[in-house]
Image (spheres, helix red, strand yellow):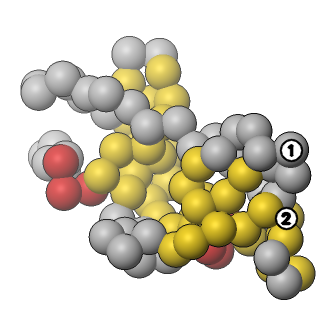
């Protein structure tokens, strides 16, 4: 993958793309092994962000750099933690 800029708003995220420029998205730096301007992911990853309606329930899978990877309405993706509230 081609490594791009780091996020100014979200620490630990790197903008990446496939060598042909496709599939651009933000990737957690923890899963990237860099080799100069290029690198590779050490685990499967999707940069998909979810749109979640107020009051929806989300099942968390993994938390990284202020975001939660989770499932909501049978869809999986990332949501900023500051938009979520932990249920009792």
Q: Is residue 48 above or below residue 26?
A: above
Q: Which mark is residue 20?
A: 1
| Closer to us: 86 or 34 | 34
Give the residue at the far bottom of this rendering: 36
| Closer to us: 77 or 3 | 3
Secondary structure of the residue carrying tag 2 is: strand
Q: Which numbered disc flags the more N-terminal residue, 1 or 2?
A: 1
Q: CA–CA distance between discs 1 and 2?
A: 14 Å
The quarter holding residue 81 reads bottom left
Q: Position of residue 19 (x, y in %)?
A: 87, 52
Q: What's the residue at 38%, 57% (across, down)?
A: 67
Would you name the residue on which mark 2 appears? 40
Q: Which mark is residue 81?
A: none
Q: Is residue 64 above or below residue 81?
A: below
Q: Position of residue 44 (x, y in %)?
A: 76, 48
* Residue 33 appears in the rendering: no
Circle 1 crowding by C-alpha within 10 Å: few under 14, some 14–19, many from 20: few
Q: What's the residue at 44%, 60% (across, down)?
A: 63
Q: What's the residue at 86%, 44% (across, down)?
A: 20
């Amino acid at each position: 993958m081609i490594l791009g800029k780091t996020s100014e708003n979200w620490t630990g995220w790197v903008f990446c793309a496939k060598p042909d420029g496709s599939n651009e998205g933000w990737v957690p730096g923890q899963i990237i092994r860099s080799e100069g301007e290029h690198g590779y992911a050490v685990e499967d990853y999707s940069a998909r962000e979810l749109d979640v309606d107020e009051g929806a329930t989300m099942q968390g899978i993994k938390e990284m750099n202020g975001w939660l990877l989770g499932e909501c309405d049978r869809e999986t993706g990332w949501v900023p933690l500051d938009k979520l509230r932990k249920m009792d």
